[in-house]
Amino acid sequence: EPHPAAAPPRSEAQAGPPDGDGAVAPAPVAAEPPAAPVAVAATVPIPAPVPLVLPGVKPPVPPEAGDQIVISIADRRLYYVGRDGRRRSFPVAIPRRRRDTIVGETEIVRKRRNPTWRPTPSMRREDPSLPEMVGPGPGNPLGRHALDLGFTYIRIHGTNRPRSVGRAASHGCYRMYPRDIKRLFGLVRVGTRVTVTWDPITKVAAHLLEPLPPVNVSG
């Protein structure tokens, strides 16, 4: 016997179940379907959030960036941040003239023990009596250790004139006490970043170095 024809499907207006008396209940308002999640392939790395960097403020240096030297002309000091995060500070002699001062970013390109000193062309023009070179020894203006920078003719070195340290006395280099350059020489490596700035350290590198504690002069 043929089955009766199936009832046509109810429209969206009749989607709700019938009430107990057989009346059709009003259909509920359909909610907007949620947005489908965006699939990210497992092999595609998700970029890290970009930190906010304000104009004129340097972002902190991550530990993997390595060690760094900051020389402050205003402070007449060299600041060193080691790869272990430790901070050290040393007095230096700075260039005596502004025109001999090169500021900016560079790096250590060579380390020399018992270096040979050769006056720059400008030094020889100013004083033709200077020798072409001075070998290792007590009369060498570089002392016993020299760190050559990427700036032409500029280096961090010892001195045979320790009283000049802390003063504006050099032709462009940065002199250190013999004990200090020996210590720094053992800490740094070829490739250590070097920044030379006119400004005090508290202005340009507060993200690297904590301010030095006040000196207790009361005894």
Image (spheres, rainbow, N blue to C red):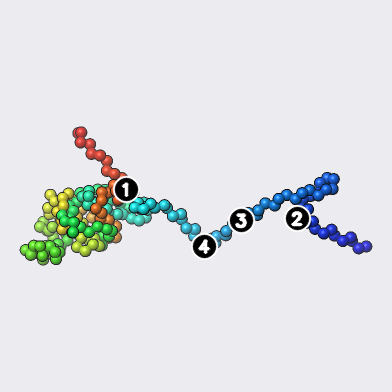
Q: Residue at x 18, y 53 (%)?
A: 94
CA–CA distance between discs 2 and 4? 43 Å
Give the label on residue 113, or none: none
Instruction: Say what secondary structure mark 3 lies in.
Output: loop
Residue located farthest toward the top when viewing the structure as drawn: 218
Would you name the residue on which mark 1 appears? 206
Would you name the residue on which mark 4 appears? 43
Name the residue type under label 2: Glu
The image shows a total of numbered marks equal to 4
Q: How crowded is mark 1: few (under 14 residues within 10 Å), some or many (20 or more)?
A: some
Q: Nearer the viewer, mark 3 or mark 1?
A: 3
Give the label on residue 12, or none: 2
CA–CA distance between discs 3 and 2? 22 Å
Q: Which residue is drawn at 25% across and 39% down?
A: 214
Would you name the residue on which mark 3 appears? 35
Q: Is residue 168 left or right of residue 9?
A: left
Name the residue type under label 1: Ala
* Disc on the earlier residue, 3 or 2: 2
Q: Residues within 10 Å of mark 4 (few under 14, many from 20)?
A: few
Instruction: Say what secondary structure mark 1 lies in.
Output: loop
Q: Position of residue 126 (x, y in %)?
A: 10, 62
